[in-house]
Image (cartoon, rainbow, N blue to C red):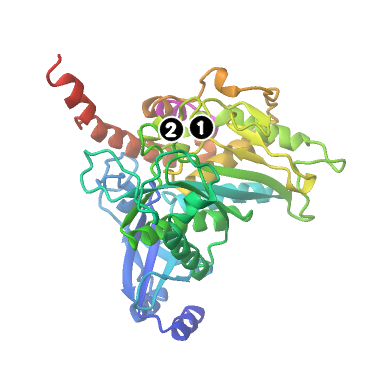
Amino acid sequence: MHRFEEWFRARRITEVECMVADLTGIARGKILPAQKFLQGLDKQGLRLPESIFLQSVTGDFVESAITDWTEPDIILHPDIETLRMVPWYEEPTAQVICDPYTPKGKPFWMSSRVLLRRIVDLYRRKGWRPVVAPELEFYLIAKNLDPDLPLEVPIGRSGRPETGRQSYGIDAVNEFDPIFEDVYDFCEAQDIDIDTLIHESGAAQVEINFNHGDPLELADQAFLFKRTVRQAALRHDVYATFMAKPHQHEPGSAMHIHQSVEDVETGRNLFATKSGRDSKLFMYHVGGLQKYLGAAMPLLAPNVNSYRRLTPDMAAPINLHWGRENRTTGLRVPVSSPAARRIENRVPGADANPYLVIAASLACGYLGMIERTEPQPPVQGNAYEMNFDLPRYLPEALDALEGCAPLKRILGEDFVTLLLDVKRAELSAYHKVISAWEREHLLLNV
């Protein structure tokens, strides 16, 4: 409590946002006066109903046989390492990410952050330390007040919308310099350690890379970053979206995850031998990703729209082949020194919960390492010309996860049941909606 109190006093904090990520990755929680927050630390006063983890992306509460419909409270334990200023408010406001616990003091199993912490602990028990670096893509779009209308590219400093693809275009990024200046300022104020910014291949599509580090810290940063970009864009009357496929004729947005494993005692990268060759653990890790990522798709591509991104020749993978410096594969191994040997998982979408993406990717690699799963040979050519072996639609992905016993064990049977219940409820809600395509092509023709 004293560390929080001193931090608040030094910055004259008046309010505190206590946040948890729900299954979708939406920030939920409560806003309290600073003094009430401090009083709640010692009295288990920071509480929320556990049903927040039963909310779908629409905000509806989902029925599940494994939950308690009396809606008992969970206790929020603020993680002081995540304590930050909220830089877009005029009033001095703090934000802190919380871990939910049961009243008996056990980590609450529905939390995606708790799940990621548990997967990382599996590595540490083996003497391994996983290291990750996310790459997050997103679009800037003109404000869209009617969800029935297609999205439009926003107007930049030139006064004209971007019409062509400008991969790595410096001037194209500069069109929105005022937004990105706010993004960098907001990130610096929150200790979000972003690395590079590039223009991606879509119109007004941007990618931000994070530096390599601890999985939980990087998931926290990605979680905060999504909110930060949306707030920065709104300051300039623009939307920022992490939707996987917002435009019909443009590439989708991904959340690529670079991952490697170090020895806890020595810090040596276990993916390379002393002579610099690929190690056995590296190969097993790749094998695990190939074997299990297909079943993990509800965590990597959690929405109906997610599967529109996974299209051949649209800068997104369609299978789980691996290759060296091959961006057509689902698993890319960049050319690197032995100390930087890593795998880039190119399958996840930007719309996914960062905690679940990193947890699932590490869980699949871990299973490969303990099961000694040999990978297929690396692909030399164009993997888009090979079979489409990822799930094509959300229902197929949900069935694949439900039928994968090893992945369910490592993620937790109850957690998987909860996730499936929420996603099937979202799918049911989606099927009730009549789309513009149906009105256009069926209304007067059938």
Please name the residue that numbered disc 2 is placed on. 309
Quick check: marks 2 and 1 in contact, CB under 8 Å?
yes
> Which kind of residue does numbered mark 2 sit on?
Arg
Label 2: element kind: helix
Identify the main secondary structure in magenta.
Answer: helix
Q: Position of residue 187 (x, y in %)?
A: 50, 64
Please name the residue that numbered disc 1 is placed on. 316
Q: Position of residue 429 (x, y in %)?
A: 24, 35
Q: Earlier in the sequence, mark 2 or mark 1?
A: 2
In this view of the protein, which residue sits in the foreground, 62 or 427? 427
Label 1: element kind: loop
Q: Residue furthest left?
A: 444
Q: In the rendered view of the protein, which quadrant contains the C terminus?
A: top left
Range of the magenta residues?
398-406
Residue 29 is tagged as none
Using a 10 Å C-alpha cutoff, classify the residue at mark 1 as few (fewer than 14 neighbours), some (14 to 19) or many (20 or more). Answer: many
